[in-house]
Amino acid sequence: MDIFEFSIQMEHDAEELYRTLASKTEQTGIKKIFTMLADDEVKHAHAVEVLQKKMDTSAVKGSMKEVQTIFASLKKESVDGILSKDLLVELRRALEIEKKGKEFYEEQFSKFDTEAGRKLFKSLSRQEEYHYMTVNNLIELVEKPEWWVENAEFTPKGDDYY
């Protein structure tokens, strides 16, 4: 399996996990976050496919700005029971997937001899890091709902970050 096939498969696996998580929650905001994460993974896979075909590709924008808004609105709601503690195992799996994705894209970044490849893999690495932060925030929401409402901040790092 080459770098492109591996990247595409990794993105499809993450998409499938987020769609599964979305189907397991009834809370609209959380379901929307999982769906946006899944949709981002589809965009990532498509961008890699375009690069694989040796076409120039621009950086892929994710949906993380909207996630910030959803987290802000959750702070105004009761968070008890928003996510089942049974989902923690799958959330931790998602966290590991995002960590490995970021590390993979960082490692592969230097191997590209084209600006398009480096630009895409840098963008994907940053988006995977932001996905990691999102999932970690969801884990904190499940594990410490009272603390999360009082203390959690979900702040983007700038428009070029995601």
Image (cartoon, grey):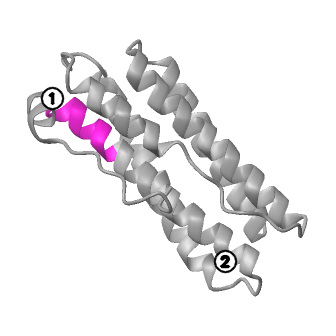
Q: Report if residue 141 lies within the magenta region.
A: yes
Q: Which mark is residue 118?
A: 2
Q: Is residue 56 above or below residue 112?
A: above
Q: Position of residue 134 (x, y in %)?
A: 37, 44
- What amino acid does circle 1 point to? Pro
Q: Position of residue 61 (x, y in %)?
A: 60, 52
Residue 63 in the image: above or below residue 50: above
Residue named by callout 1: 145
Disc 2 element: helix
Residue 101 x, y percent position in the rendering: 54, 60
Residue 22 horizontal side relative to residue 95, left or right? right
- The answer to which of 77 and 23 lies nearer the viewer is 77
Dot 2 amino acid type: Arg
Magenta part mainly helix, strand or loop?
helix
Residue in the image at 77% along x and 83% along y: 114
Q: Residue at x 45, y 36 (%)?
A: 66
User: On the rendered image, what quadrant is the N terminus found in?
Assistant: bottom right
Q: Which is more toward the observer, 1 or 119?
A: 119
**Mark 1 or mark 2, earlier in chain:** 2
Location of residue 157 (image quadrant): bottom left
Give the side of residue 159 with respect to residue 144, left or right: right
- Residue at point 68%, 85% (across, down): 111
Viewer-proximal residue among 16 and 60:
60
State yes or no: discs 1 and 2 in contact (Cβ < 8 Å).
no
Left or right of 49, for residue 95: left
Give the extent of the magenta segment: 136-144
